Image (cartoon, helix red, strand yellow):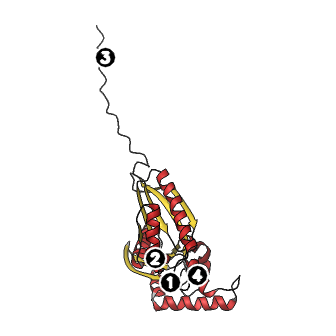
Amino acid sequence: MTADAPRAAKPRRARARPAGPRAGRPVAVIDIGSNSGRVVVMRLTTLGHLDVLADERASLQLVSALDRRRRLRGEAVERIVVAMSDFLQIARSTGARTIVAVGTAALREAANGREIVARIERAAKIPLRILSGDEEARYSFLGAAHGLAVLDLGGGSLEIIRFRRRRLVETWTLPLGALRMSREFFVADPPARRETGRLEAHVAAQLRGARACAAARRSSAPVARSGTSRTSTSAAADIRCGGFTDTS
């Protein structure tokens, strides 16, 4: 008997490998905050997660640079220009072609804010958009819905965001930023008891006036986010609202 001829192996289709976690296009966001500036470069993965490619900060101290006429002084503007230049280099070094730059409370409230924005845009050659208080709170909420945060404490303002079932319900933007409060209430270092007492009374009155405390308490676990909250959450817990958890 003759041996059967070997069967030809069926060709196998090569399985398409899923794209790597860095398959998306990098996007850079530059935040010119009242206390510090920050650049974050991210890429959306095929699984829907954000892959952080770069994350850098720079101290700006803009609230401290506001004069009596609420104008930002020249040295503060120079700090922004230098920070923007550094942030753009970081963003472009990661391959980011989409770069979004925004400013918050200090630039929003500065009497010469428009002049400063125009100067920064000329130097950086990209648009710088000043967020309204509502926009700042909304973007904080979007970050909160992703990272379980409801309170965003910066150098110039405090955003409180309440949401239910991942839907935005209410937002507040209050002039209670850490640098702003330090400048207005503290003279001694460390602050005297009477200074901290005046500050606590002021913050409590602002929160009660905005009816923000009651809303924050309705959240199952109010959470604080932002760099400033790392050093201030323990102090905030002693003020009327209390009970915040820091996830910065």
Circle 4 is placed at which residue position?
Answer: 236
Q: Residue at x 50, y 83 (%)?
A: 175
- Which residue position is annotated with label 2? 113
Q: Is residue 191 visible?
A: yes
Q: Position of residue 111 (x, y in %)?
A: 47, 81
In the picture, the quarter occupied by the C terminus is: bottom right
Q: Which mark is residue 175?
A: 1
Dot placed on the residue nearer the N-terminal end, 2 or 3? 3
Q: Residues within 10 Å of mark 3 (few under 14, many from 20)?
A: few
Q: Amino acid at mark 3?
A: Pro
What is the number of the mark on residue 6?
Answer: 3
Q: Secondary structure at mark 1?
A: loop
Q: Amino acid at mark 4?
A: Ala
Of badges 3 and 4, the one in the foreground is: 4
Amino acid type, callout 1: Pro
- Determine the CA span between mark 2 and mark 4: 30 Å
Nearer-N-terminus badge (2/1): 2
- Nearest the viewer among 138 and 64 is 64
Quarter holding residue 180: bottom right
Q: Earlier in the sequence, mark 2 or mark 4?
A: 2
